[in-house]
Each structure stands twice: as C-alpha cells, then as structure tokens.
Amino acid sequence: MKKLFGLLLLIGVLFWGSACKSEFEKVRSSNNAEVIINKAFELYEKKDYQRAQTLFDLVLSSLRGDNRAEKAYYYYAYTHFYLKQYLLAAYYFKTFANTYTNSPFREEAAYMSAYSNFKLSPSYRLDQTNTRTAIEEFQLFTNLFPKSSRIDECNKLIDIMRRKLEEKAFAEGQLYYNLRQYQSAVISFDNLLRDYPESPDAERVRYLVARADYLLSENSIVEKREARYQETIKRCEEFLQKYPKGKYSENIIDLKKNAEAKAKAVNLRLKAT
C-alpha cells in the first residue's frame, strides 16, 4: 500500500511538473508580449528567477515607452543577481541607474551595481580589476547619495576591499624580496606605504624596506655601495623614529650599525684606489 501511494505521488508530481512546464512553454512561444510580461512578473514574485529572466529577455526591447518598462528592467537586473550572474547584474543595474535617473529605484540600482562588483572581487592573489571597479562605484554612490542609509555599509565594504588591495601589494613586494629583486621590492613596498599609509602591515613593510635596501647595497658594484648603504642608514633612522620600541627595533639597530661600518669601509677603500 505504501509503495502504491509513493508511486501515485511520484506520478502526480511528474504530471504537475509537466503541466507547469507546458504552461511556461506555451507562454514563452506565444509571441504575445502582454501575456509574456505578466507571466515574467508572476514568476519573479514567485522567485523563479531563471524562467522569469527567460521571459524578460523576450519582451524588454518591445517595452520602450511602456510604463512597465522601468519595473521590468529593474527586476531583470535582479534576476541576474539572484542567479549569481554578477557581471551581468552589475552591467544591468548600472544601465538602469544611468537610464532611469528619476526612478525611485535608482539609488538601489546604483548600490547593487557596486555590490555586484563586490561579489566579483576575488582573492587578493588574483587580478583585482573588479575590486577597484567596486571601490570606484561605492565612492560614486556616496557622492551621489550622501544621505543614503547605505553610506556606512558602503564605507565598510570599501575598507574590506582596500585591505584586499593592501594584501596584494604586500604579496607583490614580498615576492620581489624572496626572488632577491631588492630594488623592485623597495619600489613596491614604497608604493604600498604611499597608497596605504595606515596599513596594519606598515611596521613590517618599513622593516623589509630597510632590509631590502641593505641587501641591495651588498649586491651592488663597489662604486654604488656607499650611497646605497647611506640610504639604508636613512631608512633605519626613519624606522626608529616611527617605531622606537617596535617589534623589529633591535634588528633595525643592528642593521644600521652594519650599514654604517660597511659604508665607512667602502669609503676608505675608494679613497685608497
């Protein structure tokens, strides 16, 4: 009896699914824009975003001038977001915000364009184009809608993404350092400190800059060593002024002493030749 009931239930579900599918296909192939748009709205409200999107695709271009076009395009953008098609979602939200400038949905669309790019933002180890785009769009949003209730959230997300860019910049400098490309490491770390002066990694970065400068001096031709040791000494002094009791202070003091001794030795050697 239980097996029979289960079989009948399965047949019922399959029949219902087939009927629903047939109804959708009937609407989709009807070429009746009125029927299609109404069904698209209905499916969207039921959170059937895939099929709603399919129907919106068929009629959006024919809705120009129709008072439902705004709502349809707005829903269409959201179907992409809910289906995790974030690249397209960002595009359609941005297009909506730029097209319907007087829409009550404009603020939401502008935010969602930026947020869709935020969702595309990858690990700091990968290309950060979407991260930078999202930051730019969130900053534009805060300028366009300074009284929005979303301002705090925008700033929070910007901070998250800026930290990701800091991590990428640090990883690049660290890579140069590990590859013994010390001049490139110094340049990369200096750029990090310029772009992110309040970075939580700043102390470690300044230490690595001094170390890279010292190692660059060690691997330079004799004629350039004294000047580069002097640069190392300068970096060490700047570090000690900023972090007199820092985690790396003792290492920096030793590094400075070594740089001073070697600069003096190189100077004497050059004078003797």
Image (cartoon, grey):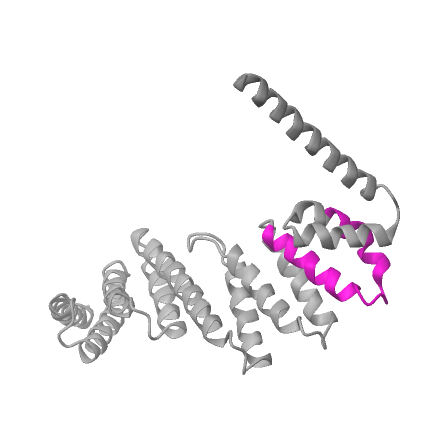
Residue situated in front as seen by the camera: 109 or 214: 109
Q: Residue at x 26, y 63 (%)?
A: 208
Q: Residue 165: image x %, image y %?
A: 42, 63
Query: Residue 209 vs residue 13: left or right?
Result: left
Q: Residue at x 49, y 71 (%)?
A: 154
70 in the magenta segment: yes
Quarter of the image where one finds residue 185: bottom left
Q: Magenta region's main secondary structure? A: helix
Residue situated in front as seen by the camera: 40 or 103: 40
Please state the extent of the stretch shown in magenta in the rendering: 54-82
Quarter of the image where one finds residue 203: bottom left
Furthest-bottom residue in view?
147
Q: Residue at x 82, y 39 (%)?
A: 26
Q: Quadrant of the N terminus?
A: top right
Q: Residue 135: image x %, image y %?
A: 51, 68
Query: Residue 216 vs residue 17: left or right?
Result: left
* Above or below, comparing residue 58 to residue 233 in the picture: above
Furthest-right residue in view?
31
Q: Residue at x 73, y 37 (%)?
A: 20
